Amino acid sequence: MRTASTYCDRFLTEDLFPAATKMSLQEFAKFHADSLNQMSPRLNFDALTINLARHNQKGLPDGEIVSAVANTPRSVIANYGRHIHLDEFTPLTFLQPGSAVFVDAVTSMENWASSAIYKIVCSPYDFHWVLGVSYVYPFHTKSVVAIDYMCCKENAFANDLEEFEVEYLTFPYFLGWLFQFGAIDAQTLRLWLSHIANMPPARFRVVRGLAERKAFNARSFSKAIGCSQKTVYRHLEIAFEELVCRNNELASLDGTSNRILALSNAYRFFEFGTASVSRTLPLRRPKVTSDFPVSLVG
């Protein structure tokens, strides 16, 4: 990789887009793992699994699972498929798409290590720490793209690694997986990647929150995502200016409401991975910060 950010325009256009559109499922899984590990040593996972699955009312996979893995045998998927009825962790990530979940936020590591799914699926492959995030498969309300990062016992995730950071880092790859699984075409993938190019974490939070809400109220919106109204409007203003650079016809739009509507329409695809406002799943740490101790935009 030539860049230190999953949102750098060069990475999105010259690395991720060609990888997503030309590689096989297994090759793209390896690209996902290698490039993300290189650009985010704080995440630093040992293995990666990606599953496209339907889920039932309890949140468990229901029916055929299309899977890819990186840095681990494919047998881990087959083994999991035979024992999904024992999994008490996966339903959480399935039921709230867009929310990253650490297993140690859901239960104690002692309980996790004594669970059947850990003993049968994780322990044989030396996986101890698990972090999952799922996304909606477009226009299929019961289908999700579930991405799990796994670490060996001696290689735990960084103590200060937060859910939002994982969600931010993973989203560009999720868009690539949508192409891999046949949900979008190459033109759509290229357009969506151009919309998120060079987007910093704070703007990602604002845009994602905008896509999630059915109506916009500056006061409640800023409170929900944890920043001032001035900051919200500033990020929306910059996002609109960047949108105009890609579509000059929008330059003639007057009024805040019209511009926010244009942004909402352009970034509607964020709905497939939203968790900024309505998150109900447990956090690993009680306080979430907006800034990461690494450079995410190159």
Image: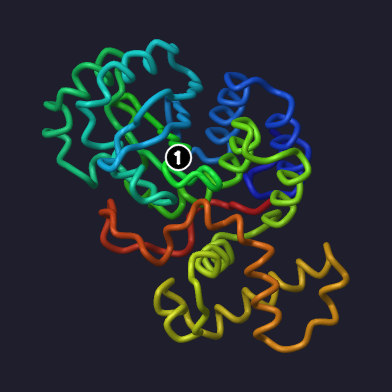
Name the spot of residue 21 as percent of width and height, x first: 72, 30
Report the side of 132 relative to 111 (left or right). right
Which quadrant holds the N terminus?
Answer: top right
Quarter holding residue 244: bottom right
Q: In the image, what residue occupies the spot 36% across and 51% down?
A: 96
Would you place residue 41 above or below residue 95 in this image? above
Mark 1: secondary structure: strand
Q: In the image, what residue occupies the spot 55% across and 60% down?
A: 201
Quarter holding residue 237: bottom right
Nearest to the observer: residue 200 or residue 195: 195
Name the spot of residue 117 as percent of width and height, x first: 21, 24
Q: In the image, what residue occupies the spot 29% across and 59% down?
A: 280
Nearest to the observer: residue 44 or residue 186: 186
Quarter holding residue 172: top right
Tell me which amino acid carries mark 1: Val
Q: In the image, what residue occupies the spot 32% across and 20% down?
A: 80
For the view shown, which residue lies furthest in the bottom direction?
A: 255
Name the spot of residue 65 as percent of width and height, x first: 43, 24
Report the side of 246 relative to 240 (left or right). right
Nearest to the observer: residue 160 or residue 229: 229
Nearest to the observer: residue 64 or residue 166: 64
Would you place residue 225 above or below residue 196 in this image? below
Which residue matches tag 1? 144
Would you place residue 136 above or below residue 54 in this image? below
Would you place residue 167 above or below residue 177 in this image? below
Report the side of 55 relative to 274 (left or right). left
